[in-house]
Image (tube, helix red, strand yellow):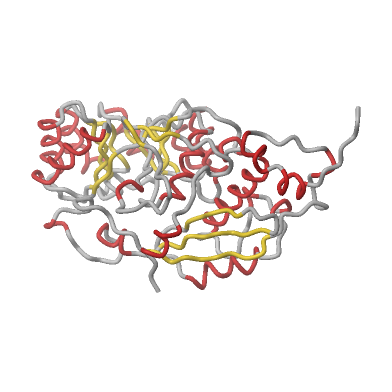
Amino acid sequence: MAQFSFSRRQLIAGSMTAAAAGLVTLPFDVAGKSERITITKIELFKVVVPFQDDVVNSKEYLTWAEDSLEMVDKTPHFMLKVHTDSGIFGIGETARGIQRKDVQKNVDYLVGKNVLDLNLPRLNLPHERSGEAFEVALYDIVGKAVGWPVYQLLGGLAQDKVAVNYWCGRKNVEDIKRVAERCVAGGFKVLKMKSSFGDPVAKTVEAVAKVAPDLRVNVDFNTYYPDMESFMPLGREMDDIGNMHTFEDPIPRADLWGYYKLSELLKTPITLTFDQPAKIFEAAKAQACRYINTYQRPSLAQFVTNSAVAEAAGMPVWHGSGVNLGVLDASFAHTCAASPNATLPSDILSYLRVHTLLVKPLEIADGYVTVPHGPGLGVEMDEDALKRFAVS
């Protein structure tokens, strides 16, 4: 058999059409330190993209504190374009509220590095919190280089559609009716809403049942109740309404005994939010919950690992978020696609913004997002939108 010795650069430059169609078969000797996809520059775009109307808290719950829901769509994100000498670039997105000087630390570290030398699940970047954006962009580059969707780099496709929920802040009885009607019109099966200590949340959930009887409700309590005894009366009242999907984080997460008792005494499934495998294992061992809300910090591969730990305990998961823009949401879709038990509706919520910053938004229908199947993330950033929503 004839021996071929194409470099990775030749394959990338000369076979991008073939790469886009599927896996490029690489000879044994092309992968490694002798081959290079060198990062030449990284562009940063600071943006603020507002929510659509009627998403965040009802009027009486407005606080305007810096950490409140009203600030979510007023706080900047950085969008990234990581360029390489191969002509391929990857796109990424930071969580909100990160400072440029911190993002720049990672830029300075990565420029000049060979993408093929980097350990993507363990980048160990100087600024960890903004590292997610760079990791997403690097997975995008590698996927484009070999013609694979990101989910293939994470272990393969387990599901090509990922369940998503509708989302809103703290709502009063009248406002939640409009939200519920939008849910039904959009084909969503689950509405996730926020609640704080003392909110008349049972009346709000009951209002949903009246206007949308088939819609399930997830209430995220953000651990506002101090202990199991203080939450139990409300839990029982909401159990009796009959439309609950889950109670999310009602009491402090460290109180696994309290969660065990809630899971034992209430009909509605309990959810705990953890982003570390050891914490998920402890929760499973304590029989503290039936569902897990997890995240992809510090890496996309970590979400798949977290999901696998939960799966071993027989628990489904969903992907949490900070109500992001389209690039991060695309990465969430890929990590869920590679996780067979990521079957609960995830927080893939960029559709709530006035723009996702993608040329073609993620396709959401009947409560599911279709996973992009193109190389890398399979999505493209909208250059005009970047300019439109740019801030200094």
Q: Position of residue 85 (x, y in %)?
A: 70, 59
Q: Position of residue 44 (x, y in %)?
A: 51, 66
Pick the front one: 4 or 282? 4
Place residue 17 in its image quadrant. Answer: top right
Viewport quadrant of the C terminus: bottom left
Which residue sits at x=77%, y=47%? 10
Pick the front one: 346 or 267? 346
Residue 176 in the figure: left or right of residue 159:
left
Pick the front one: 74 or 149? 149
Task: Look at the picture and state if 326 lies above or below 3.
Answer: below
Which residue sits at x=67%, y=41%? 146
Total labels: the figure holds 0
Place residue 263 in its image quadrant. Answer: top left
Task: Look at the picture and state if 238 lies above or below 327.
Answer: above
Which residue sits at x=44%, y=44%? 274
Q: Position of residue 357 (x, y in %)?
A: 40, 54
Q: Position of residue 71 (x, y in %)?
A: 29, 62
Viewport quadrant of the N terminus: top right
Task: Look at the picture and state if 85 lies above or below 338.
Answer: below
